[in-house]
Image: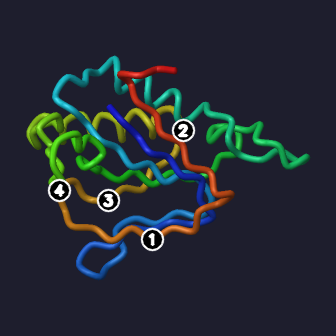
Amino acid sequence: MRAVIQRVKSAKVEIDSKVHGEIGEGLLILLGIEESDSMEDLKWLASKIVQLRIFNDKEGKMNLSLIETKADALLISQFTLHAKTKKGTRPSFIRAARPEQAIQLYDAFHQELESLLKKPVATGKFGATMQVNLTNDGPVTIILDTKNKE
């Protein structure tokens, strides 16, 4: 499971020119699921994201987490995070989980985030063509991968 998280002042996702999910300050989470991902990966990644100390404290230092700030989260599925680009110029998505597996893990990840944050988490729509707009804060952008837990 791979996530790109961006600290934002605001973010929204539109589907068919209509706002589907929108947040104020918080995290935009782009989530890619691959075939080998499990519930263990899901729980580790969700816990890591909500506890990362990437929000500024009163002194302006990144010292607070999503849980501590009670900021919002917007979760977007993005299979392209598992693109293989080693050969040629056309990406391969062979490692990305098939939709029937990925949607179950995506939904479970969404529920896990809501459980950890004790509040609703905005989402896009799995498999839809979406337009994501954000105002990056910092900018702070972090990549997390359950196969490379550095």
Q: Earlier in the sequence, mark 1 or mark 2?
A: 2
Q: Which residue is mark 4?
A: 127
**Which mark, by number, is residue 133?**
1
Task: Say left or right for 70 vs 75.
Answer: right
Residue at (36, 41) in percent of width and height: 110
The residue singled out by tag 2 in the image is 117
Please provide percent x and percent y for residue 127. 17, 56
Where does label 3 land, which residue?
Answer: 124
**First of labels 2, 4 by sequence position:** 2
Label 3 residue SS: loop
Q: Secondary structure at mark 4?
A: loop
In which quadrant of the rendered image does the N terminus lie? top left
Amino acid, disc 4: Gly
Q: CA distance from mark 3 to mark 2?
A: 18 Å
Instruction: Give me the C-alpha separation between circle 4 and circle 3.
Output: 9 Å
Q: CA distance from mark 4 to mark 1?
A: 18 Å
3 or 2: mark nearer the eye: 3
Question: Mark 3: which amino acid?
Answer: Gly
C-alpha separation, residue under disc 3 versus residue under disc 1: 12 Å
x then y, percent, for residue 82: 26, 40
Nearest to N terminus: mark 4 or mark 1:
4
